[in-house]
Image: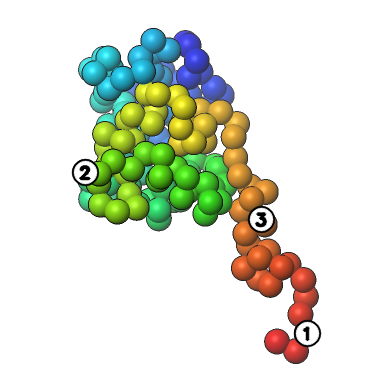
């Protein structure tokens, strides 16, 4: 099953963030042009799981919602890094087009791939962000 095997993935034509079913891409595939028809179809489905509104691109809100549905806890910093890594000039500012999304998965070197195919999570970073947003996590009287 190659490098993309995790407790989250199974061989299936149906892709689902809710059920944690991800595309299985051959470990030899590192470029979009090398994808099989089935792999391309599965990556299209994965992209559509993130782009539920059908805009043709994934923005911060889509990315956060998709990763959260998948059971991950993306911090704002992590989301910005993912978009920065995967943004192509053909996509609207601060968003990911389908090609950039597919490249991120095929390359296996992106933070998006880490979130989806490994145990990587930024739950602690997210908790720290929430504490800062609420005044450092300290009780403040008279506010």
Observer able to see residue 123: yes
Residue 124 rendering spot, x and y as whole percentages = 67, 48
> Circle 2 — which element?
loop
Q: CA distance from mark 2 to mark 3?
A: 34 Å
The mark total stands at: 3
> Circle 3 — which element?
helix
Side (left or right) of 102 relative to 24: left
The residue pinned by badge 1 equals 141
Q: CA distance from mark 1 to mark 2?
A: 50 Å
The quarter of the rendered structure image containing the C terminus is bottom right
> Circle 1 — which element?
loop
Q: Say if mark 3 contacts mark 1, CB within 8 Å.
A: no
Q: Residues within 10 Å of mark 2 (few under 14, many from 20)?
A: few
Kindly identify the residue that appears in the image at 34 percent across and 53 percent down: 94
The residue pinned by badge 3 equals 127
* Residue 108: image tag: none
Kindly identify the residue that appears in the image at 49 percent across and 36 percent down: 111
Observer able to see residue 116: no
Q: CA distance from mark 3 to mark 1?
A: 22 Å
The residue pinned by badge 2 equals 90
Side (left or right) of 25 relative to 54: right
């Amino acid at each position: 099953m190659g490098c993309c095997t995790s407790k989250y993935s199974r061989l299936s034509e149906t892709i689902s963030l809710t059920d944690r079913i991800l595309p299985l891409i051959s470990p030899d595939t590192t470029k979009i042009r090398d994808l099989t028809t089935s792999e391309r179809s599965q990556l299209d489905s994965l992209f559509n799981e993130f782009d539920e509104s059908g805009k043709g691109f994934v923005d911060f809100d889509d990315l956060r919602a998709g990763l959260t549905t998948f059971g991950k806890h993306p911090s704002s910093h992590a989301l910005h890094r993912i978009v920065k890594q995967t943004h192509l000039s053909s996509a609207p500012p601060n968003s990911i087009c389908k090609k950039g999304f597919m490249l991120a998965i095929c390359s296996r070197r992106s933070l998006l791939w880490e979130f989806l195919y490994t145990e990587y999570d930024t739950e602690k970073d997210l908790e720290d962000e929430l504490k800062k947003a609420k005044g450092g996590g300290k009780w403040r009287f008279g506010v």
